[in-house]
Amino acid sequence: MNTMRLTAGTLIDGTGKAPAHNMSVTIRDGRFVSIEPQAPQPERGNEGVIDASTYTVLPGLIDAHTHIHTPGGPTDNYALAQLKGSLGALALETYKHVLVDLSMGYTALRSLSSPAYVDISVRDSIDGGILPGPRLKVAGQGLTATGGHMDKAWWSPDLNVEGRTGVCDGPWACRKAARTQLKWGADVLKINPCVGDYRNLHTPWRQEMTYEEIQPICEEAHWAGKMVAAHTAGGRGITDSLRAGVDTLEHAHWLTDEQLETMVAAGTFYVPTLIVNTRSVEQGGGQRDVSPEAWAWLNKVYEEKWETLRRAKEVGVKIAAGTDAGFVVPHGENALEILELIKGGFTPMEALVAATQTAAECIGMGNEIGSIEVGKRADFVIVNGDVLADPSLLLDRANIMAVYMDGVNVTPSL
């Protein structure tokens, strides 16, 4: 058996408990087997020692909403990512992006749609030991209605681009689309039941998939033991999604009291992706080509998302941290969502739990990762400084001293 001992100056275990100091954590065969106060002179024997006695140790961070095939930043070229070069080149770029996230302490990512199953290929290469990298839960192609959120008219109608997204209309086509994603190895199904609508700010959302289309997708996913993530904005599209049994609501800027009560009763996760809207507003008129209508909508979201977050937290909805990194938010800046949650009323500890234990549950790995507890995989990050006093430390790579997965140092050399 491979045994090592981790000494932690400050230990934040991801469960929400107060930090512990001068702790000794034993890791055996890649899992935590004991967590106890450090002896004055810990017995070393044949054990290796990871000395973090002057640092903060916390669970590997998790981003529950990313797009790993795109870099993120002030550009609108995401729809063309798969046309810039070969799919092989896109896969290599995708792998680079996940390494950037790993270097910042993010040991697990959920990627909600990529073209041509490139996310599945990268995940399989990591899981198969061909390449080192973070744990990935991936969606393959996102499922959308014809002309919907992920099927915009980017190109001439004379041009046909295959494999970019999963377009489906009607119950049986949606069922087949779900089966297709599962066939090729999707961990989670991503759907787009409702989106923002710039035309009327009194009802700033528009439904794109019917209950009859959403329900068979959820049924197929759940038969296969998989989860469904729904891109949403507000209105009946959310109600139909909850009724159909989606597992996570993404964005969901506007949620009614009834919808929140349904989420609590069903255990539905909320991934508000606060930073992607904040960053969009920050980049607004200068760096991005945004219409006046879209600009008004973005500002409405920015003003009202905080109240939705407050009400969701107040009633006990499970809230997980997700950035939408790869769209506006660059990979490597994932910890910005932790700061946004704090801005929205979370304590620093609550925000860290949203990016660890709750995020692990949201991506279907709550029994394996997300907290430093006996029996779980030894994924952890060693950070220089008091993260609770200053969570922005997580945005500076110089403060990320080492990243471990299964008790092995996997810190990328970038």
Image (cartoon, helix red, strand yellow):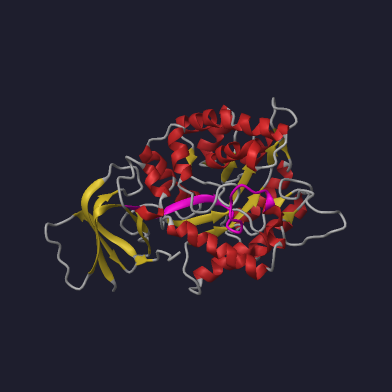
Of residues 154 and 25, the one drawn nearer to the viewer in this rendering: 154
Q: Is residue 193 magenta?
A: no
* Quadrant showing the C terminus: bottom left
What's the residue at 58%, 42% (across, down)?
A: 249
Residue furthest out toward the left: 40
What's the residue at 35%, 41% (across, down)?
A: 390
Give above or below for 325 relative to 279.
below
What's the residue at 48%, 73% (across, down)?
A: 129
How many numbered marks does the figure carry? Answer: 0
Of residues 338 and 309, the one drawn nearer to the viewer in this rendering: 338
Q: Is residue 72 magenta?
A: yes
Of residues 84 and 172, the one drawn nearer to the viewer in this rendering: 84
Give above or below for 78 relative to 90.
above
Residue furthest out toward the right: 158
Q: Quadrant of residue 188?
A: bottom right
Picture coordinates of residue 155 (x, y %)? 81, 53
The magenta segment is: 57-77
* Quadrant showing the N terminus: bottom left
Q: Quadrant of residue 380?
A: bottom left
Q: Is residue 84 visible?
A: yes
Picture coordinates of residue 57 (x, y %)? 31, 53
What's the residue at 55%, 37% (across, down)?
A: 278
Picture coordinates of residue 337 (x, y %)? 48, 43
* Residue 223 falls left or right of residue 269: right
Q: Is residue 356 visible?
A: no
Residue furthest out toward the front: 286
